Amino acid sequence: MAYSVTELTPTTGVQINGLSGAALVDPGVAAECAAALELRGVVIYRDAHLDDDQLVAFSRLLGTVVPLPLGGEPRHPEIQKVTRDAAQSKLAAYREGTFFWHIDGTTAAIPDKATLLTARQIAADDTGDTEFANTYAAYEALPPQEQAALADLRVVHSFAASQLLVYPNPSPRERAAWDRNPAREHPLVWTRGSGRRSLLLGATADEVVGRSRPEGRALLDRLLDWATQPRFVLRHRWRVGDLVVWDNTGLLHRARPYGEHSARLMHRTSLAGEEAVA
């Protein structure tokens, strides 16, 4: 099947047109996707129109697919519904937290390797775009002296930090529920076995070890502003049937705000991480 591949920004993203349905569930297509993820971080298949069986099958060609908490598809525990409709997902109340820049799984020793998201329904008012910020490129663009200054810093990540952005005045019961999710300390600069480096930032980044809270917060906020400036960001405007795959370890992502009663509905799978943060 003939298809086209287009690079989207100088650092990030490729868009592939002309592959859909069963044609994607092919080892050769998956190998090309994996190579593009390594180089460009985000792969967009326009009008892919994968059904749930095909979504899971394609995901398995890319890596180990993990069952997701409170998945909404009985036949496929690997698929999670992403929606703000509480009738469709028990996680709907937490989706407002995805409006902030984040990396999935930062409170785990090994964050998810990659995420696949396909659009089943989109918002009628064109809200709900997804943005990606390339933290490999952001790190590489830092002056060498700042890279050196960040080399040994460590950051505490917590679920509570991300929730406080949405609910700044939780009840004691709410805060206790958040705190049952254990926090995790990671280096601020994630160095892969290959030697490649990225910044590990986002909504869960709570405090810098060994620095006062105001000083640490100022540093994290400044670096997040740096990493999410337009030259490092790709914005995807969804169409029904689109499939987007991204490197969860080296790209921040966020949903642009959409309403609580929005029709927006995505099906998501995640690939198990393969490299601990170091």
Image (cartoon, rainbow, N blue to C red):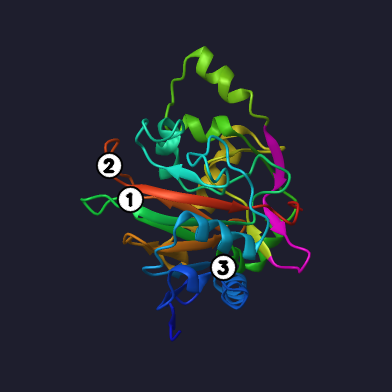
Q: Is residue 219 left or right of residue 118?
A: right
| Residue visible at 49% across and 60% down in the picture | 133
Residue 128's disc number: 1
Image x and y of residue 208, in percent: 65, 40
Q: Residue 56: name its quadrant.
A: bottom right
Q: Are marks 2 and 1 in contact (CB under 8 Å)?
A: yes
Image x and y of residue 189, in percent: 68, 55
Front label number (3 vs 2): 2
Circle 2: residue type: Ser
Q: CA distance from mark 3 to mark 2?
A: 33 Å
Q: Is residue 255 left or right of residue 106?
A: left
Image x and y of residue 105, in percent: 62, 44
Q: Seen from this angle, which residue lies furthest left? A: 125
The reply to whether residue 193 is visible in this rendering is yes
Q: Residue 2: name its quadrant.
A: bottom left
Q: CA distance from mark 2 to mark 1?
A: 9 Å
Q: Are marks 1 and 3 in contact (CB under 8 Å)?
A: no
Circle 2 sits on which residue?
262
Circle 3 sits on which residue?
137
Q: CA distance from mark 1 to mark 3?
A: 25 Å
Q: Which residues are magenta?
A: 183-196
In the rendered image, the quadrant that contains the N terminus is bottom left
Q: Determine whether 55 is above or below 172 in the image.
A: below
Classify 10 Å Cα crowding around label 3: few (below 14), some (14-19), many (20 and above).
Answer: many
Question: Under tag 1, what secondary structure?
Answer: loop
Q: Seen from this angle, which residue lies furthest bottom? A: 2
| Residue visible at 62% across and 44% down in the picture | 67
Q: Earlier in the sequence, mark 3 or mark 2?
A: 3
Question: Under tag 2, what secondary structure?
Answer: loop
Image x and y of residue 88, in percent: 39, 35
The reply to whether residue 134 is visible in this rendering is no
